[in-house]
Amino acid sequence: MSKILKRVFALSICIILLVSEIFNINVAGAAQTGMETGYGCQVGKYVYYAFEMGGVRMGIRRYNTKTKKSKEIFSYKINGEESNGFYDISVKGNYIYTVWDQYYGTGSSRTYIYRIKKDGSGSKRLACGIKPVVIGKRIYYEKCKEVQVDYGDFYDKETVWTGKMYSMKLDGSDKKKASPVKIKKLTGDWVENKKTDIINGYRYFVKGKNLYREKADTGKVKRLMSSSDGITNFYVCNQYILVKARYGKGDKMAAYIIKTNGKDKKRLASWLAAE
């Protein structure tokens, strides 16, 4: 190859890389990698969280890890009417990104991706979708569509999943088809009994009625917490873990927050298991 061709080739590669950076194009063909979303997200001294379904609905709440107090910053009610609430919560910059299921009950769903100010003072519907993952300056999500369902004596608006992966800018603009993304596993439950991916040198898992942490390089295991009737699932959010567990007699459920080292456990909510 002549020197001129080599220079042209090198210049072409530089241009391609520059364009891919500007327009967020993955020229290598490798899947983008994002963090699994769940009950909440820790940013600084605050943990933003919400638990929904299984007998509980709540608005988005903010837990202060210094004062150990929490308060609701955004309601799950729409004009006074209840909804199924929020899940798949993440935070970037001044906003919370989440799925809001505006249906109430287990018969169907109305799932929309919302951007909500961290102080709860405002919100914006970005798209009809589920499983939003923020990577860089874009949100990757599974697209859904609205349909009218005939129940005989009335029609009701619901959403159905299309199975198609899309991405959009953080403000909801520039929606377009996208390739599937790799997800770093941050959740676990008693059914699958699988370990999370490595998070700051550790994996987390449920076994029996206990939640454990395993050091990735040595395999050393430490029990973080127990529940009398078993831990149903958990989500690791930076330095904290959000946990749902059964306790006591009957169908009592509770949500806890605990540090990833097993300290400072606090009950956030309790309820009777239902739909």
Image: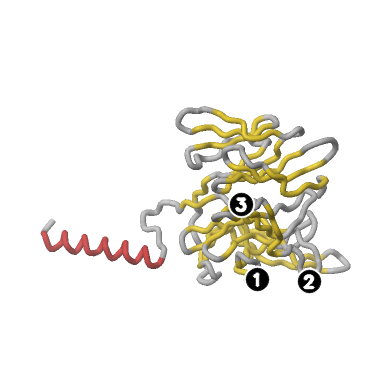
Residue at left offset 52%, top offset 27%: 220
Q: Classify mark 1: helix, strand or loop.
A: loop
> Few, some or many C-alpha atoms within 10 Å of disc 2 (few <14, some 14-19, many ≥20)?
few
Residue indicated by mark 2: 79
Percent from the top left, x then y, of residue 173? Answer: 53, 72
Using the image as rendered, state which of residue 49 and residue 274 is in the foreground: 49
Amino acid bearing label 1: Ser
Q: Is residue 87 left or right of residue 24?
A: right
Question: How far apart are labels 1 and 3 at the CA level?
Answer: 23 Å
Assess disc 3: are there few (<14), some (14-19) or many (≥20) residues with their C-alpha within 10 Å of its C-alpha. few
Q: Is residue 20 left or right of residue 14?
A: right
| Cβ atoms at labels 1 and 3 below 8 Å apart | no
Q: Is residue 164 at least partly visible in the picture?
A: no
Residue situated in front as seen by the camera: 19 or 209? 209
Q: Circle 1 sits on which residue?
A: 121
Q: Amino acid at mark 3?
A: Lys
Q: Quadrant of the N terminus?
A: bottom left
Q: Earlier in the sequence, mark 3 or mark 2?
A: 3
Residue 73 badge: none
- The residue under the point 57% across, 65% down is 95
Mark 2 secondary-structure assignment: loop
CB-based contact (under 8 Å), mark 3 and mark 2: no
User: Residue 21: x percent and y percent?
Assistant: 37, 63
Secondary structure beneath dot 3 equals loop
Q: Amino acid at mark 2?
A: Asn
Badge 1: residue crowd in 10 Å (few <14, some 14–19, many ≥20): few
Residue for badge 3? 66
Q: CA distance from mark 2 to mark 1?
A: 16 Å
Q: Kindly identify the residue that appears in the image at 65 percent across and 54 percent down.
A: 63
Q: Nearer the viewer, residue 166 or 120?
A: 120
